Image (cartoon, rainbow, N blue to C red):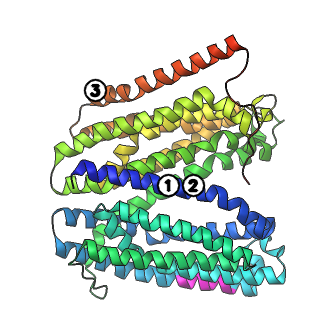
Amino acid sequence: MSAGRTLSRNIFSNTFGHVVNVVTFFFLTPYVVDALGDRVAGVWLVLVALVGHYGLLDLGIRSAVGYFVAAAWAKRDQEGVNRTLSTALAFLVGIAALTTLVSVGLFSTLTQSPQLLGDWVRELSAGELQDTRLALLIMGVGYAVNFPMMTFNGVLYATQRIDLQNAIGVSQTLLRAGLTVWVLGRGFGIVGIASVTVLCLALGWITAMFFAYRVIPGLTLRPWRPSRETFRPLLRYGFFNSLVNVGDIVLNATDALVIAVLVPLAVTTLYDPAEAVTYYNFGALLIPHTMSLVTAITWTFTPYATACHATGDLPALRRLIHRGSRGTLALGTVFATGFLLLGEDFLRQWVGEKYLTGDVYPSSATILGILAIAFLFRAKESCNRQILFGTNRVRFLGLLALFEVAVNLVLSAILILHFGPVGVAFGTLIPVVLTQGVIQPWFVAREFQVSLGSLARGAFRGIAPVMAAMTAVNTTAHTIEGIVGMPLHSTSRMRVPA
């Protein structure tokens, strides 16, 4: 299959998988909350968040597997593929054992001294506490086993069979949703949901293992014979990849934390920290979900970039930089322009006029507009970011992530004192413009011998037509509204999902 057809297949399958996940989450979450009740549902969310952070324990090795296996496979180095996977598997088995011990330790703590895990535990009845302990143990052990078994998913990713990955993922999502409804309907609670989650993970592992051996017929794993020489580059790549992941987590959580801690010191004393976070959050909530859609597309470029890099095909990498960036920028412009032109109307329908008046707190639409510009810069560089991952420029990405986190925290802390929550939004925007608008494009141009002028012209061709067309449509719609004397959109209030 040609490179273009492979990329198109992977983009379509990854986008479809992302949409299925979002839609399933949208409809399933209210059902789970209603079935469990607010308190137990909160406990379940705490367990999911706790176990979800286990992913940081692998030190980025699973991401490193994707890069090094893709590079070896592109060069038809079967022994390199086997050696990389065997070494990674040996390390991840050790991480699985460590994670299991952590889960058993948390289970023991929750049994003997539950108060050590926080105030939320004190509100649980004896039965709820017992279910929480068992669910924690099931989820913890299941996610521990997930570490080594994910290497088979890495094989599918590295060989650019992302369509198979998504076929497995979509099947898991739909099966988990159906079984979740079934177990909750029969009163099995969070123990039932935990069991369903781990069962679906296990079925995914088995399926991925089957396809991995089909995709690479000569695959031979010997985890009892790891290679020290192979492990060092794996660990180096994984370490800097972990810095990027931690940076993303911190950036997503920073704004609300800064507002909650520092808003009492801001320019006005009328702000209530909790309310200020709510107003800010309604403006910021759409951004990460939209960015994840862009990333779902550009993520598929990474193994292709690795293959081009491994075989020395620099012209193909340059084409990907130009065409991929222009395409994702055009998509990002659609969303960013929509947020700027229609964001206030959408928020009015979604959450109500209260959050748009600006009487006490800044309008949520103002926050959305500022963050939409930051989103556009991130979307512009999303393709290049994945190319840097795929060509082992991960050290640069890790250091860039640390720099952006530091600048974000400092600027947000300073600007909130003078401008309140709007200052926090600008504290997010400015470092994004600096890192994604200046530093990363310069680095990409230097590393791949691409003209900065050509990148700028490509960006203009990606933005200008889309923004002009959407602005013209919006202006025409408002003109028609003025002529006919009635809005063209519904004024019915949308309900915020639970």
Q: In which image quadrant can residue 422 be found?
A: top right
Give above or below for 287 relative to 34: above
Q: Residues within 10 Å of mark 1 (few under 14, many from 20)?
A: many
Q: Amino acid at mark 1?
A: His
Residue that badge 2 annotates: 22
Label 2 with label 3: CB-CB less than 8 Å? no
Q: Residues within 10 Å of mark 2 (few under 14, many from 20)?
A: some
Q: What percent of the width, then of the height, locates residue 49?
A: 62, 66
Q: Nearer the viewer, mark 3 or mark 1?
A: 1
What element does badge 1 sit on?
helix
Q: Amino acid at mark 3?
A: Gly
Give above or below for 453 relative to 281: above
Q: What percent of the width, then of the height, locates residue 23?
A: 59, 54
What element does badge 2 sit on?
helix
Q: Amino acid at mark 2?
A: Val
Q: Residues within 10 Å of mark 3 (few under 14, many from 20)?
A: few
Q: Residue at x 78, y 47 (%)?
A: 274
Magenta residue span? 100-108
> Is residue 105 magenta-colored?
yes
Q: Nearer the viewer, residue 271 or 413?
A: 271
Q: Residue at x 24, y 82 (%)?
A: 220
Q: Nearer the viewer, mark 2 or mark 3?
A: 2
What element does badge 3 sit on?
helix
- Label ID, residue 18: 1
Secondary structure mostly seen in magenta is helix
The N terminus is located in which quarter? bottom left
Residue that badge 3 annotates: 453
Q: Nearer the viewer, residue 71 or 175?
A: 175
